[in-house]
Image (cartoon, grey):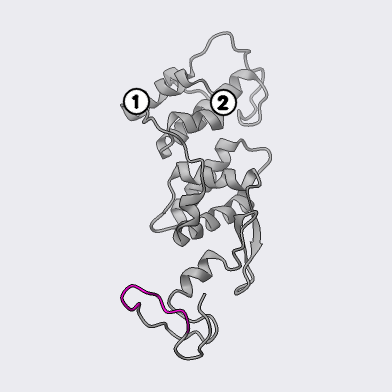
Amino acid sequence: MNRTHHSAFIDLNLVPCLGNRCCDACPVERCDYARKIRESIHLIRLGARVGLAGQLTGLEKKTLKRLYRELIGRPSPSGQLPYSDTWLLENDRYQFHANLIWYLHRRMNCRACSPARILIDVFELYTQMTREPRLDLTRTAFVLRLFTTGLWTEHRCCLCGTAFPAPVDSNQTTCPGCRLYHRHRCHRCNTPLSPKSRGVRCKRCSRCGGALV
């Protein structure tokens, strides 16, 4: 069993580990506890608050609060976790990043991995791939929850044909990537669009006359 000298790891009356297997796959209580502590440390260092770490690992708040203070040097911030997708639907750039997270989750999701491990892997790869990440760890966890609970599902873009996630009852027909791209070019003739006039976006292309996305 892997060892850690962190004080939050110390617990009493735990069944001893009888093998040398990896803690991530070991059913023994002590190994399971060690895995949860490691995942909590990783989550906190990535920006998770106590509430999110508790949801993902199942550890007690008392343990996580002590762990957070020892790692960060101050108490965990209070406040509710995201519960509405309104902020996501109102911003195409957020949806574009949520789309990227969705693809990463589909590629990296593993039944043998814990929810905390999946979030850590997806978020770390997301931040490595994007120059300016728009979603922090808390919002990334919320986006993954939208997918896993079925509130968001797969849709098909009518312009590029790729799959993208959106609410189940959404009438969106274009992916966020196409919506961002075609803010500046006509989706029919690819003509660059003229700048906004007095803050009002043009509704039709000046070249082909087609309605803009």
**Which disc, if any, is residue 58?**
2
Can you give x and y, in whole percent of width and height, for residue 53 in the image?
49, 31
Characterize the magenta stretch by its predominant secondary structure.
Answer: loop
The residue at the point 51 percent across, 40 percent down is 83
Category of crowding for the residue at label 1, using alpha-carbon neighbours closer than 10 angstroms: few (below 14), some (14–19), many (at least 20): some
In the shown orientation, is residue 157 left or right of residue 121? right
The N terminus lies in quadrant: top right
Note whether 20 is above or below 187 in the view shown: above
The residue at the point 52 percent across, 48 percent down is 85
Can you give x and y, in whole percent of width and height, for residue 112 in the image?
67, 37
Residue bearing the label numbered 1: 75
Note whether 158 is above or below 19 in the view shown: below
Q: Nearer the viewer, residue 209 or 162?
A: 209
Note whether 172 is above or below 201 in the view shown: above
Mark 2–mark 1 Cα distance, whole angstroms, equals 19 Å
What amino acid type is highlighted by mark number 2? Answer: Gly
Can you give x and y, in whole percent of width and height, for residue 68 in the image?
39, 26
**Which disc, if any, is residue 173?**
none
Q: Is residue 202 magenta?
A: yes
Q: Nearer the viewer, residue 69 or 87?
A: 87
- The tally of labels here is 2
Q: Which residues are magenta?
A: 196-204
